[in-house]
Image (tube, coloured by chain):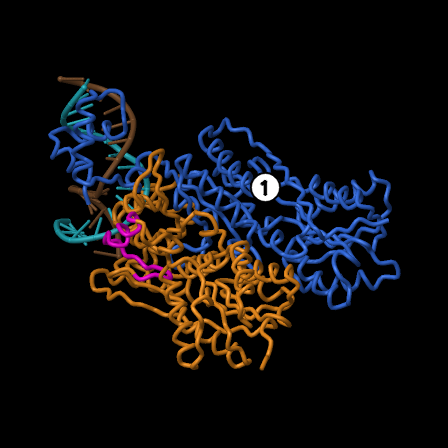
Chain colours: A orange, B blue, C brown, D cyan
Amino acid sequence: MVTIKMVAKQSGYSVATVSKALNGASDVSAETAALIRAVASDMGYTPNSAARALKTTRSYNFGVLFEDATNSGLTHEFFSYILQSFKRRSEELGYDISFISNRLGGRSVSYTEHARYRNYDGVLIASVEFRDPAVLELASSGIPVVAVDYSFHRCGSILSDNIQGMRDLVSHVYSLGHRRIAFIHGELTAVTRDRITGFQRQCLELGIDIPKEYIVEGRYHSPDVSGELTRQLMALPNPPTCILYPDDISYIGGFNALERMGLSVPADVSAVGYDGVNLSQVITPRLTTLRQDTEAMGERSAEELARAVEEGISYVPQTIVIPGTLLPGETVKRIG
Amino acid sequence: MVTIKMVAKQSGYSVATVSKALNGASDVSAETAALIRAVASDMGYTPNSAARALKTTRSYNFGVLFEDATNSGLTHEFFSYILQSFKRRSEELGYDISFISNRLGGRSVSYTEHARYRNYDGVLIASVEFRDPAVLELASSGIPVVAVDYSFHRCGSILSDNIQGMRDLVSHVYSLGHRRIAFIHGELTAVTRDRITGFQRQCLELGIDIPKEYIVEGRYHSPDVSGELTRQLMALPNPPTCILYPDDISYIGGFNALERMGLSVPADVSAVGYDGVNLSQVITPRLTTLRQDTEAMGERSAEELARAVEEGISYVPQTIVIPGTLLPGETVKRIG
DNA sequence: TTGTAGGCGTTATCAG
DNA sequence: CTGATAACGCCTACAA
């Protein structure tokens, strides 16, 4: 491994001058800088982040916390896309990405300890059980934090506009004549609450009355659960003409259940998803859904986190709401 | 931030003893060790990986190289799952995970420079353009490397058994009476070559003669391309009775194209995917496909990389082939 | 413009 | 069993 000291010896300058030259300091003559850089390059010099971090207490490394549990984290298309764009933008801004876990060497530690151990300059919290005390601890640890789809006290947060998203969907199916609209929602998280709020407000505004039994709790990303709930909804004395699913994958379960009941989408029942994953746009019939702007969410997360890091104590936590886009597909029939 | 020095002062022992106690060295009395650990814990001591790495030249950090290009990397379900299990197993083995990029601070650098800069103990190469000179450089940089679905000279490699996978699929459709079997394969990568080999060998072994126009090059993860090629195949004077697709997503495109031609799966044409992604098992009809064992691939990658790191110069690169599993679905009809 | 020296937090060697 | 002490590679006052 070639170090600054070796470059110094080789070039005839001192380590201080070499360090400055390599970091583009202004108090080194242009020629010396050029010479030193040439020598360094010749020798195959690469800086050492550990030494640099030790000295500067900046790692230029973001930690990301993704849940590993079933149906979540990396294997969740929505979050994969966010991570992808977060990563790209972070790298542009000069930060690398590492995962936070609750292990260190052999033993388990808290997320906060892990993040401190690795000197992460900032942390992205996404796709986790936000009520987990370990997560809360991290959020209030003093390390700059940005959360995706959740609001922590004093942390930046990037939210998908779930309220407006649901309103858009409701308006859309309403405009196609639907009044008996059911909503299978996911587990009662903050996101889900927003969606329910959006759903109810828009119904209220449009003056349609949704019977209580039309709003049922299902589970995200579970075709099975959605299938079963779909059966139950269709067995009601007065079944809905349109069902809103918690996400696109769940819709698949609903679709299958309907087919098995001899009902077809959208001829007999209309249906709507949420997320706008790739799949939703290649299946037949193409799914009417709300595309969440994962690209923007990841990008803004990175930018916000970089700001939080760089502004330090003077950073004022921002809440950024990212609008989605209605993707009108072929699963909602015009009726009435 | 509380350091060893502070713990030393507080506990009355020297930094040397504290360091040893904290690292479980044998030459510290049990009581002192316990006392020191208690004090450290009280003070909220967390070690500093940068200092440790600087001193030991070990970071306990794996770098992973994932391509960002379209249809690849993180947003590719297959690789997401591998990454997920690689991450989990690595953490169990005491390593954290970071991404390798070609940027550093503002400027672009080679993957190798990046990996050196961050002191990664080892590197996982997956989902990239393996012919990229920058990737080749990394593979031969001397840093321990394990590659997924590719074989580099002198690097560990974890391969999905693509040859056997194709043989299994061919056998399966053959056993259901199919003889006119078409194969739309992906871009000509090493993986693809194996699949073609498996396909051809098995056909040969079963004594079925596949006309040249039945084997066509498409593109991975492109429903559109597969749809178009499906149309072309079905327009042949003597069209196939069964089509093998490069992957499950591509099958969706084929399925749609067939439907639009008034043909239904599997009544009129049989079809088969590859990968066994979640989607494939929730759609109707359930897809006959070959599930790649991403869980095992990620796990073994981590274990192999840890070995490569720990055995150092004496490590003998292993090639580990992971078998997949045939998932018989409902998309292949018994005929003949 | 360049160089000297000290120290970031940790581990490792060697002496007590 | 415990403790000085010297690095690891780098940055940064401060001095020259």
Most distant residue in the right direction: B237
What span is in magenta?
A: A133-151
Q: In which quarter of the image is residue A192?
A: bottom left
User: Whole-percent x and y of residue B143?
Assistant: 47, 39
Q: Quadrant of the C terminus of chain A?
A: bottom right
User: Whole-percent x and y of residue A104?
Assistant: 34, 38
Residue D10 or residue B44, whichever sits in front: B44
Type of amino acid under label 1: Asp
**Rendered view: B102 above or below B224:** above
Q: In screen coordinates, is A213 left or right of B6?
A: right
Q: In which quarter of the image is the N terminus of chain A?
A: top left
Q: In screen coordinates, is A37 left or right of D4?
A: right
Q: Can residue B33 be seen in this view?
A: yes
At 76% from the left and 52% from the top, the residue drawn is: B183
Residue A115 colored magenta?
no
Q: In which quarter of the image is residue A10?
A: top left
